[in-house]
Image (cartoon, rainbow, N blue to C red):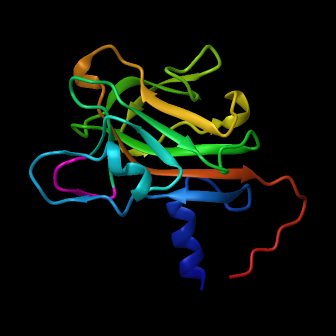
Amino acid sequence: MVGVCLLLATVLPFSELDYKVVADYDFNELTNTAGNSVEITDNFSALVPGFSGSKLYIPARTNGVLQISSSSNRGRLICSNENVSADCTMFIRASKMNKTPQKTKLSIGPYGESPSGSATNLTVTFEMDWLEPVALSTVATDGSIIIQPNDETESNRRILIDRIIFAREREHGFYFIIR
């Protein structure tokens, strides 16, 4: 049983003693064995309930990865479900298209045509790693948020999302985790 606990601790970007997972999206249902990216914008809500957007793709020869944007058009991912609440923190595992570390801008904000002044604008180095956690209390939410690249350079717009976790910070003094 100890091995299982250690495995789970390495998979999550936080300690289970500090956070409780509310929702975990891994996009494993997205598979593309072809040599070109496949746009799935029209069917995405059926594949992953609670999510929608524009310019959403499954990259070539991948499984469990969502691509936001094409090389020429900026896309966006919209999350509209009960897991988007001010008491949650969002953790995103992402990388750039060419898998080399690059700095780019990512905006996370309330749903609308574009994130407003209350958006959290992150300038991050993507390395298929967990990005800086986003406390949704810092983003004006009504149950919907938008995630989109905020980079004017066309070649920098494509972002690959591997996993999104919504978690609540634990505020109790005592914990018992029984496995």
- Which image quadrant: the C terminus? bottom right
Q: Which residue is the extreme one toward the bottom?
A: 1
Residue 25, x across and y down, in percent: 49, 57
Depth check: give the residue in front, 159 or 76: 76
* In magenta segment, residue 60: yes
Depth check: give the residue in front, 150 or 102: 150
Compared to residue 101, the image places residue 5 above or below, namely below
Residue 176, x across and y down, in percent: 81, 73
* In magenta segment, residue 90: no
Residue 132, x across and y down, in percent: 55, 36
* Magenta segment boundaries in residue numbering: 58-64
- Which image quadrant: the N terminus? bottom right
Compared to residue 26, the image places residue 54 above or below, namely above
Along the horizontal axis of the image, is 122 left or right of 127? right
Compared to residue 136, the image places residue 50 above or below, namely below
Q: Residue at x 67, y 52 (%)?
A: 167
Along the horizontal axis of the image, is 40 left or right of 48? left
Along the horizontal axis of the image, is 167 left or right of 146? right
Q: Quadrant of residue 145?
A: top right
Q: Quadrant of residue 102?
A: top left
Compared to residue 93, the image places residue 108 above or below, namely above
Q: Quadrant of residue 87?
A: top right
Residue 41, x across and y down, in percent: 33, 43
Q: Residue at x 18, y 45 (%)?
A: 37
